[in-house]
Amino acid sequence: MSHLEIPSGTLDMLVLQTLARNGEMHGFEIAEAIERVSADVFRVEEGSLYPALQRLLIKGYVRAEWGRTSENRRARYYTLLAAGKRQLAQEVKQYERATVAIARILQPAMG
Amino acid sequence: MTLTLWRRLAELGRRAWYFLNRNRVTRDLEEEMRLHVELRAESLRKARVPNAESPLSTATAFSIRNDPAFHAAQKRFGNTTTIQERSRDMWGFGNLEALASDVRFAVRRLKYRRGFALSVIVVMAIGIGAVTAMFSAVDAALLRPLPFRSPEELFATSAYRVPFDDGRPENDGPARMPDLADLRRMKELASEAGAYASGAYNLADNERPIRVAVGVVTTNFFRMLGIGPLKGRVFTDAEERVGSQNVVVLSYGLWQRQYGGRDISGLRIMLGTRQHEVVGVMPRGFSFPNESDLWVPMSIPNTFATFEAFRGYIPAVTMVRLAPGVSGATAGAQTLAQMEHWYSTLDARNRKNHASGMERIRKSGTMIPLHKQLVGDRSTALYVLLGATVLLLLIACVNVTNLLLSQASARQREFALRGVLGATRVRLIRQLLTESVLLSSLGALLGVLLAPVALQMMRALMPKALAGVAAADLNLRVLVFTAVAAVLTGLAFGVGPAFRSTADGENDVLKNGGYGATAGNAGRIRRLLVSAELALTIVLLVGAGLMLRTFGEVMQRDSGLHIANVGTMQITMPGSADNRVARLRKLNDILARLDATPGIEVSGAINDLPLTGTGGISVMLQTDGPPRSKGGGPDFTRMIYASPEYFRTVGMTLLRGRAFTASDDSLAPKVVIVSRKMAEANWPGMDPIGRKVSLGEQEMTVVGVVSDVRELRLEDEAEQQMYLPLLASAPASVAIVARATMPPAALLARMTDAVRAVDRSQAVYSVRTMEDVLDSSVERRRTNALLIGTFAGLALVLASIGVFAVVSYGVSHRARELGIRAALGATGQELMHMISREMLWVTLFGVAIGLAGAWALSKTMTSLVYGVDIHDRITFVAVPIALLIPVVLATVLPARRAMRVSPSEVLRTE
């Protein structure tokens, strides 16, 4: 099965959720996590991850700090902030509402 | 609410931090992304060759290029540079940064093409400078609201005069026209009503007496305008009582100039013959009306004393501030109704007297917005000139567009290359537009420096009444306008070439080296643009032609005077009856001194110098001639006081009888000299000498007939004129004229010397030659013609340059085609004709459209032309001819190069 593009706008949400679940991660780890958890359906076009991370940084949803990987390489670790947690909850709620609505519209056709 | 605000501020803080740490953030991003790619490469390696101990497991620099896993990882990651840019763009200053780098790049590029850049900047400076200057004038005169409190509530009315009390009680009956006093009682219509008038006084404080402009205003004048004094106070209402007018308020300018800005308490100055106490000073910049130097209160009602220091009656403008909520239309309707009502109550005789006045009121309306009253009839000229400058700017833009288009083809290769390297079309276009706007901005900057020169020239066109109120200068509004114009202009001439330069088909362009199919297209567009340029130029030339012909027609008119070598000066003496003898003596002394001066042939005096636009008196006379059928309105005759030698001095001809002599003084029988027109009108076909003229109870005898004079304006017909001996009545204000054989400067010096020798403290003003007087009287028309002529000339130069450029471009870029034709047997002559013919069609097309446009647009100039039809045949024929000469030159000169194309050379270098 070929990989799907992540729907636009949901990348931020997925990144936040990944950080919520896993605490501190650097960019590569986040990309891997999303692929793994989504059972490899979504492949992050790895480029789009970094602009998204910058966006989250600007908005104050995550924090970034330089640290060391297990192999002692310099990497930038991102952590979820309280504001990010709040934003995540809000976005998840909106997403669920949208999904329900779409499902309802599609139901008769699937009947 | 505050949460969002706090969040926004925090975000702004973060962005600012980024701005200050841009470089570090970039480096961090690079490192981050590099790590990502390395990790991805490692994971790919592990997946493909799980057990291999690859010597590349620690990605070292030299082997990266050959590592397939690294390549794959890089590919998955994407275009690092683009992603970096996008990441940085998130921080939001990307746009600003891009703009800054665009500007830097543009500046660098322009430094390499200095000649081109300079020519564009100069062209833009001319166009934008002209538009800026005109906009400043139009804004000051027409657009900006008057600098008074709620200026939209201020109206002028010609229907309600200031009441005049001449001591005769019968003027107070029912035949009295409604006046200012009545207006003041209509509280529900007007919250305030007042009046202002402009005159001049002699200010005799220093060794050199000067003449000052005086505003004679009602005591509520300053209150009505909402302008308070800088120092002291303005007039109190008590000072409106007849006899209480010995106070004065100074303007800031006069206060500084004459009195050094000193303390005004107790300051008394001599105006005319009376001491006035200075009670206040107005703020800087206020000199309404008519650039007043000081103000005195106007008594209500006016008496003879009000006008004593002036030449007589000075017309006042009645001004009202409408009550809140009352519109101009309502006020106009109500006051008109009141006037009609009053008029209907008159008896037959009074009704006849006021008939023409009522007609005038009905036609123009009773209430006119004050702004409109002050602007008068100048608005048309200003708007037409503004239109002319916009046309000039358009022509300049078209020219520059053409210049840029010729470069567009050359740059196509460069931009195709950059497109392949990853620049988006949008980005490239943005860069080109930045370059264009930079050029036009630099041009605008230069233009702004040149604009004051143009503004000086235009002073004559500004409504005089606004001179003290709204100056046409480079204020903030105008500069903002210039900035906007610069940006719009840059975009306008840049957009076409920008799109052309970055046109698609990169592969073709790179392959063909930039020539090919697009060349023909570009040529057509450029030729079309030249047509447009020529059309616009024709419109401007027609406008200029009409104005020049008008000016010529006006100057052709015979004033009736011969004014070469004649100088003039004006003096005003104390005007009361007691001073009559003194005035007479002074005048005689001055004239005697002038006659005694070597070099001065003859001198004279008159109370109303022709062509100065001053009021003067017109009267209705009775004569003993045959009764006349009064077809039109009442018959007015201009009444003028002249000295015996006046007629000879100004070159008027004595047609019959005699001139005045010294014995025609106040004791002798009253005599008059009539103008030819008056003689014809009153005693047609008869000898007017010996006939009688009566004015009121005075009966006078005609002793001479002189030629007609166009007294007011050259455009107007001469009126009927009647001259009385100056020395019999000794008016207060007199113009002295003298004819001499010496140069003007010397003559004028002698004239002022003569006055000073007689009375040191006598103020002399308006010292100039009669030719200057004539020039002043036509100054507006001359300025009109000069300005439009200059704009049209500039347009012609630009259009010619445009034609030259297009033909040159055609010749050099069609070298291959021309070479082939030559090889096939075409002679140089034939090639030249081919190129010229093409431009001929372009020109004819442009001229045709231009003439059609000018034909339609000339209607807007109807009120500006004189003696010339707006579709004047001479102009419409001469203009295309005038255009063709430079255009033909601009075509033939570069076309001749076509003759020298060598086919073998061209075909070889491909």
Image (cartoon, rainbow, N blue to C red):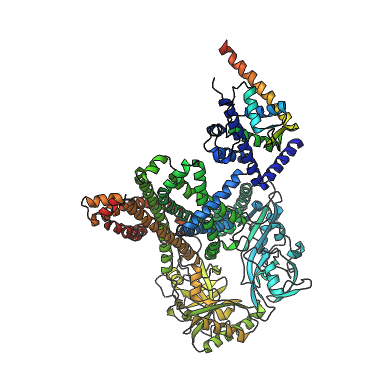
Horizontal and vertical percent for residue B463?
A: 56, 61
**Relative depth, front residue between B105 and B736:** B105
Residue drawn at x 50%, y 67% is B779
**Relative depth, front residue between B46 and B492:** B46
Horizontal and vertical percent for residue B49?
A: 56, 26
Which quadrant does the N terminus of chain B fall into? top right
Horizontal placement of B692 versus B476: left or right?
A: left
Res. B204 in view:
yes
The residue at the far top in this view is A111
In this view, B609 is above or below B86: below
Residue drawn at x 36%, y 48% is B523
**Relative depth, front residue between B629 and B851:** B851
Horizontal and vertical percent for residue B402?
A: 41, 52
Res. B127 in view:
no
In this view, B243 is above or below B444: below
**Relative depth, front residue between B782 and A40:** A40
